[in-house]
Image: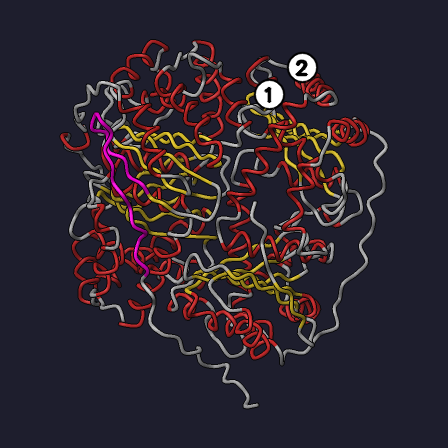
Amino acid sequence: MNPIDRTRAPQAGAMQLTPFPTIFRDTLSNGIPIIHIPFGREDLTEIQVIYRAGHSFETQSGITQVTARMMQEGNRSYDSLGFAEILDFYGASLDIESGFESTSFSLTTLTRHLDKTLELLQEMLFHPTFPEKEFSQYLQRSLQQLNVEEKKTGYIARRNFTRLLFGKDHPYGRMTGREELSGIEHHHLNACYHTFFRPGPAAIICSGSYDREILTDNLNHMFGKMTISYHEPVSHAKSLLFTTIAGTHAYPLAESMQSTIRAGAPSISRDHADYYPLLMTTIILGGYFGSRLMKNIREDKGYTYGIGCSLNSLRYAGYISVGTDVAHEFVDPCIQEILHEVHLIRDELVSFEELETARNYFLGLVLSRRETLFQLGETVKNSWVNDLDLKNLDRVFKEISDLTPNDIQSQARKYLNPAQWVWVISGRTK
Amino acid sequence: MKKIDYTVHMLANGLKLIVHEASHIPRVNVNLLYRVGAKDEDPNRTGFAHLFEHLMFGGSRNIPSYDTPLQKAGGENNAFTTNDITNYYLNLPAHHLETAFWLESDRMLELDFSQKSLDVQKSVVIEEFKQRYLNQPYGDAHLLLRPLHYKVHPYRWPTIGKEISHIEEATLDEVVNFFYGFYAPNNATLVVTGDVKTAEVVRLAEKWFGEIPSRTLKKKLLPIEPIQTEARIETVYREVPLAGVYKAWHIPERTHPDYYPLDLITDLLSGGRSGKLFQYMVKETEIAQSAAAFSWNAYDPGMISLDGKVAPGHSLEAYEDGVRKVLDNLMDVSEKDLQRVKNKAEATAETEFTTLMNIGLSLAIYDSLGDPEMVNQALDHYLNVSREDIHRVVHQYLRPENCSTLYYLPK
């Protein structure tokens, strides 16, 4: 047998770009859209009921998130404990997510219990009772938990960073914290529910191994008969202008052992034409283990356990964020290296090889996120929330396949200007 | 739940290969588990197994960069170290399967031992130590609980290490010795899961790993932890807003039949919002701001821990009385409560095995525990637990004299 050549990578063909599984669209008798993703070998189904509700629509900060959470704490048929017990008894789980442009209630259930657990979901969505005791306990616990969070450099940095990027009057600039929670009173919950949830969901996304016809019938029975008083609510994120306070901002925390650095600037929305080219640029800079920031600041200098750069694109705007935790004495050298890397990606063309590596890494990641019914449901939800074309869930392949080193440089020059960035340092006391 | 089919192959050098074919996605997971963990460390060089895991990414004899070729192939990877094992895994497109064999076999063959890589990774690990344990409120609680719970067994130190100085003092010689003492085909299990053909995987394993010699392992016999006979208590004062209470009881090793009822007990206590601890301590009496129990599936005798924070205005005594009451009530668990946690266990297993990665990792871990077939048997063990079993193990293990308690109090 010939000795093998261990110095060279084995040959392999081109990456197989498997298409997104076929999705099917139905409409309930009153117009609520249903998106089906038939998938899976397992006895599992996920139902995501999505509302146009969240941070961007509310007039009182944090109220939608709290209302959505409190909907599982009691309804016409079950009290809080009873509801938790019966869901657990069927092995089902409920995930409530309230973001900027949407709030979703996701039920994951063994398909053989789908009928029973759907009824439970219906009770929660249509007949919540918002027991006062549950609310006051929840509020108190959350505030106590904030006492802990407020001692974390990461929390302090995150909260101030978003505020400095967008201003506290803009939905994207507010994280629900002490001030917001303290302002919420019990009677606000019902008002919020009637404004955003009672009028009915904006869409329902189903994925898993269920019978499409039977499920659509069931959903029609549950949601199709309600009179939809639905009209698209106005997103304040769309209408409000934001103000950024660039420059360096320090938040000392005496007992900290490390400082958190957060740096970045407002950036493009998810539907912007530059989304994928800019995303690739941030990946090369700091989006994976082989990125420039990781290679330089972790693997060469050893300043940190991890450093990253991400593009967070929301529906109407977005932001670029570089983040890391470092020992206090590494703060200044670390900032110098971040600046060095940002200038380098602006000033010099990336090699074809580096671009190819990052591109393949990212394509691999996209494909690996199509493995489970949950990941597929998540992808479709994100596309729906951001008003992207659901007929073209594979657009990413085309968008990034033609990118050149020149494209990366022009993206970096257009969107990465550290002189105009917000720099937040929390921890170091000097 | 569907059975997980797999085949087992033993190479002449002692490397065990397990293959599970699954073609729902054109990807493959390659999981390489080495049977070495923090428990194999010298007590004066704690944190070494984990530091070594970092060095495994610093290049090998023929391949200067581990990550770049993998990323170019559309793959990603990571690793973790526990007290018992060190596990490396890669996820990549199925047609790049051989890339994984090339990369993993070269670093099993020989690392590129470099002083620069050691110096940098020491610094990275020290920052990790701070980020995860020292720069978080309550972050070092479990670092303090371990030596209270274990007096002689090496589980008394955590994988990150006992103290930063142990990491600072590690030398290149020690790195080389550790490699040849523990990183060997005869100390590893390789699991390949995904859109592959078993015969081809076996061929590639022989091609890339077959020529690596077996090595003499430096495994030591570990001391057996003596039976605890009286309650242990330690108190520390820190800059924290609420009193933390951390309790630990000795339980048997993962392969002991009592592990299953004990693990279900932690589900009864804190599996989801219906958990007894949350319901009684947090909601009904409002004594605690949070309270949750965990079982640690250790290869040697492990622990159930119960972490909680006392709500303002309540005493440690009230908290302790509340916990005792919840534990005593478990002795008379209702059939319905037991059925609920079993149903939940079934749904969790169904969800867990939706990814190649979880299947590969489970096969590797069960193999290193003694039998990969446990992947298909574990759920039945849970479903067969009776009310009598629960009663018995609460009585036998969750006794006050078998318990260590750390009070983590505001200054």
- Vertical comparison of B329 with B208: above or below: above
Classify residue A315 as left or right of residue A376: left
Tell me if residue A229 can be seen. yes
Cα distance, mark 2 to mark 1? Answer: 9 Å
Label 2: state its secondary structure.
Answer: helix
Query: Picture quarter containing residue A195?
Result: top left
Disc 1 crowd, CA 10 A, few/some/many (<14, 14-19, 20+): many
Residue at the image position 44 percent from the left and 81 percent from the top: A8
- Lower position in the chain sequence, tag 2 or tag 1: 1
- The amino acid at mark 2 is Ala
Query: Picture quarter containing residue B18?
Result: bottom right
Q: Position of residue B290 (x, y in %)?
A: 56, 24
Q: Nearer the viewer, residue A25 or B93?
A: A25
Tell me if residue B112 can be seen. no
Q: Are marks 2 and 1 in contact (CB under 8 Å)?
A: yes
- The amino acid at mark 1 is Val
| Numbered disc total | 2
Residue at the image position 49 percent from the left and 59 percent from the top: B22
Chain of the residue that carries numbered disc 2 in the rendered image: B
Asked if badge 2 and badge 1 are on a common chain, one would say yes
Residue that carries the numbered disc 1 in the rendered image: B310
Chain of the residue that carries numbered disc 1 in the rendered image: B
- Vertical comparison of B132 with A120: above or below: below
Residue at the image position 18 percent from the left and 29 percent from the top: A235
Q: Which residues are magenta?
A: A18-36
Residue that carries the numbered disc 2 in the rendered image: B318
Q: Position of residue B263 (x, y in %)?
A: 67, 36
Q: Position of residue A87 (x, y in %)?
A: 50, 26
Q: Is residue B336 shown in magenta? A: no
